[in-house]
Amino acid sequence: MSSSIKGEAFQIGAHVEATDGRCGHVTRVIINPVADSLTHLVVEPGHHEGGARLVPVELVVGVEEDRIRINCTRQEFDQLDEADDVQFLPVDTTGVGYGSNASAWPYYGLGTPLGHHPQPVFIDRVPLGEVEIRRGDPVHAKDGLIGAIEGLVIDPADHHVTHVLLQEGHWWGHKQVAIPIGAANRVGDEVRVALTKEEIEALPEVNLRA
C-alpha cells in the first residue's frame, strides 16, 4: 500500500540544472528549525571537495524526481555564497598525516618545506540560527535506530517542510516513507522521531505528487 503526499520532494543527491546546463548536485539542505522551512540547498559542482554554493530556495523553479531546476545561469551560480570555509592545517613534517578528511592542495607559501603543503579542511558554512541535513543522517525512533535521511518534502507555496523522507533499514526491506515534520526533531548529528519502530514500519510507502 502507498500513500499520496502533496508537495515537492527534495532528494539529497539530486542533480541541479541551471538555465544553461547542469551545475552540480545537492549534498545537503539547510532549514530554519523555528519555522520548519527550507532556506538553502548546498550544491557541489563536482565530485571533489570545495566549490559548493549556497543556493537560496527562492531560485528553485522546478523539482522533477532526481532533478532540481534553478533560475540562474552557471556563471551566476558560481557567484553565489560559498558553502564551505577552508582552513589550512600546519605543515605536517612527521609523516603521520591529519586523517582522511584532508587532501593536499597545490599551495606553496614562503617557508613551506619542499614537498610539504598545508592541508585544507573544509568546514560547512551554515547561516546563523539554521541547521543542515545530510543524506544518510541517522534517524532514531523511540526504541532505536530506524533508518537514514533521504530528503525532505516541501510545500511549494511557502517552502515549509511537511515531511522527512526516510529510507527504512534492510530489516523490513527498503521502502521510502514520509514522517510528518511535527514528529521529527534534530538532535546533534541525528534526527529523533517521536514514533516507535513498529509505528514507522506501519507507515505506507510514500507516493509523492505535486
Image: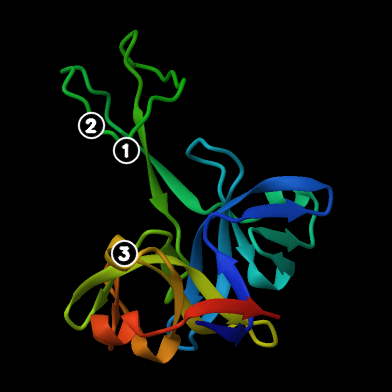
Q: Are discs 2 and 1 less than 8 Å apart at CB?
A: yes
Whole-percent x and y of residue 43?
A: 58, 53
| Earlier residue among tags 3 and 2 | 2
Q: CA distance from mark 3 to mark 2?
A: 33 Å
Q: Specify the label residue 169 is tagged with.
A: 3
Q: Residue at x 43, y 68 (%)?
A: 175
As drawn, 110 above or below 1 = above
Q: Residue furthest bottom?
A: 182
Q: Residue at x 32, y 67 (%)?
A: 147
Q: Residue furthest top?
A: 114
Residue 142 location, quadrant: bottom left
Whole-percent x and y of residue 60?
A: 71, 68
Q: Residues within 10 Å of mark 1 (few under 14, many from 20)?
A: few
Q: Residue at x 56, y 48 (%)?
A: 52
Q: Quadrant of the C terminus?
A: bottom right
Whole-percent x and y of residue 188?
A: 26, 70
Q: Residues within 10 Å of mark 2 (few under 14, many from 20)?
A: some
Q: What kind of residue is marked 1?
A: Asn
* 85 with respect to 42 (left or right): left
As drawn, 17 above or below 169 = above
User: Which residue is tagged 2?
Assistant: 98
* 92 with respect to 134 (left or right): left
* 39 with respect to 62 (left or right): left
User: Which residue is tagged 1?
Assistant: 101
Q: What kind of residue is marked 3?
A: Gly
| Earlier residue among tags 3 and 1 | 1
Q: Are discs 3 and 2 less than 8 Å apart at CB?
A: no
Q: What kind of residue is marked 2?
A: Tyr
Mark 3 vs mark 1: give the one in front: 3
Q: CA distance from mark 3 to mark 1?
A: 27 Å
Secondary structure at badge 2 equals: loop
